[in-house]
Image (cartoon, grey):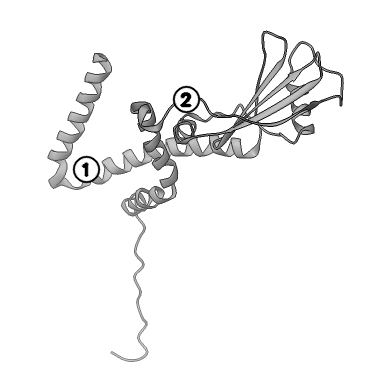
Amino acid sequence: MTGTEPIVTHQRRIGFDKINRRTHLYSGPFFIPWFLFYALSSAVFNHPAWFGSGPVKMTPLFDRTYTAEPAITQGDPRAFVQRLLKANSLDGQFIVHWDDDQRLVVNQVRFLYNTAITFDPATRRVSASRGWANLRILLGRVHTRGGYDTNGSLQIFWAVIVDVIQVTMMIWIASGLYMWWNLKRFRGWGMVALGSGFALFVAFLFGL
């Protein structure tokens, strides 16, 4: 061997097996907060007594006159409510309806709190109160919130994350099955686990 001989290096090929393992491995830590809260929030529905009960205590924020524009008395109030909220520093996603007294009732739901706003066209008074979510309500909101029929970039991004989590769950299932099938000595026990899982699910599906 002389000093003039070239040094040969071997590059490892990145095959599907490695990509599959890395995807299965690293997607988990990124989504830990979402999976953790989804898991904890399931206990809220199964064991609601563990997390307390009762209505949320609402704290008044303000009660004042709103005369910035003619008061709406009928029809779709959403555009009016958007201007009303902006004028009172309460921008964001909301749900609105007319109550039996022909008042506008607006509800803004966040993960940590919700704000209730009422506008009376007859008196031109707008009032608002806020209640902070307890653990039971917080976990329930994390579990059920989603959808693109919202306003605000964070709300849309949350909906995107929910879709990504759904896809990630399917990838975890597929990648896990692929790795299990390639371990031939474990195929038998894997079949037992897979078959019993499906059998139990179908039994509950038709029995409950």
Q: Position of residue 192 (x, y in %)?
A: 14, 34
Quarter of the image with the N terminus is bottom left
Q: Is residue 10 left or right of residue 137?
A: left
- Left or right, 142 with respect to 51, comes to right
Residue that label 1 marks: 181
Residue 124 in view: yes
Q: Which numbered marker is on residue 54? A: 2
Task: Give the SS element for disc 2.
Answer: loop
Q: Give whichever of 69, 129 is nearer the camera.
A: 129
Q: Specify whether residue 42 is in view.
A: no
Which residue is painted at 72% across and 25% down in the image? 127
Residue 182: give x, y in percent of width and height. 22, 46
Residue displayed at 44% across by 41% down: 34
Residue 174 or 200: which is nearer the viewer?
Answer: 200
**In front here: 96 or 145?**
96
Pointer 2 with pointer 1, Cβ within 8 A: no
The residue carrying pointer 1 sits among few (fewer than 14), some (14 to 19) or many (20 or more) residues within 10 Å by Cα, namely some
Q: Picture coordinates of residue 123 (x, y %)?
A: 81, 16
